[in-house]
Image: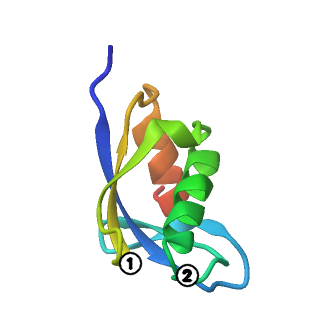
Amino acid sequence: MTQPIRLAIRVKPGASRTVVGGSHGDTLVVAVSARAVEGKATEAALRALADALGLRRRDLRLVTGATSRDKVVEIEHPPADLTQRVDMLRGAK
């Protein structure tokens, strides 16, 4: 069984559309249309990230950053090619 992997993300709430991609330093950017109210942007970001990585939402768990734009997410059952998937989203060559 694979070990959980932690991934740093930067959430941009209130975007015109939901997009997972790009980087902010070493973090993956997740733009969501949901506002940063009552955890709605965080939940939208976790759902968008799961979709973009081809995972189920329940495989992702917020570790830190509930009220911050910078968050750390733990992926419970990471696929073998998770690093490549994240690099593609970041726009790495």
At a point 33% along the width and 66% down the height, the residue shown is 71
Q: Say which of 51 and 88 sits in front.
A: 51
On the rendered structure, is 17 left or right of 46?
Answer: right
Q: Is residue 91 visible?
A: no
On the rendered structure, is 49 left or right of 34?
Answer: left
- SS category of the residue bearing label 1: loop
Percent x, y for residue 4?
30, 33
Q: Quadrant of residue 60?
A: top left
Q: Identify whether 74 is placed above or below 47.
A: above
Q: Is residue 77 visible?
A: yes
Marks 2 and 1, the one that precedes in the sequence? 2
Three-letter code, disc 2:
Pro
Percent x, y for residue 43?
54, 61
Three-letter code, disc 1:
Arg
Q: Say which of 48 and 20 sits in front.
A: 48
Q: Identify whether 78 is placed above or below 62.
A: above
Residue indicated by mark 1: 69
Q: Say which of 90 and 38 sits in front.
A: 38
At a point 62% along the width and 39% down the height, the residue shown is 54
Percent x, y for residue 62?
36, 54
At a point 48% along the width and 55% down the height, the residue shown is 93
Q: Identify whether 41 is placed above or below 54.
A: below
Q: Are marks 2 and 1 in contact (CB under 8 Å)?
A: yes
At a point 61% along the width and 57% down the height, the residue shown is 48
Q: Which residue sits furthest front?
A: 38
Residue indicated by mark 2: 13
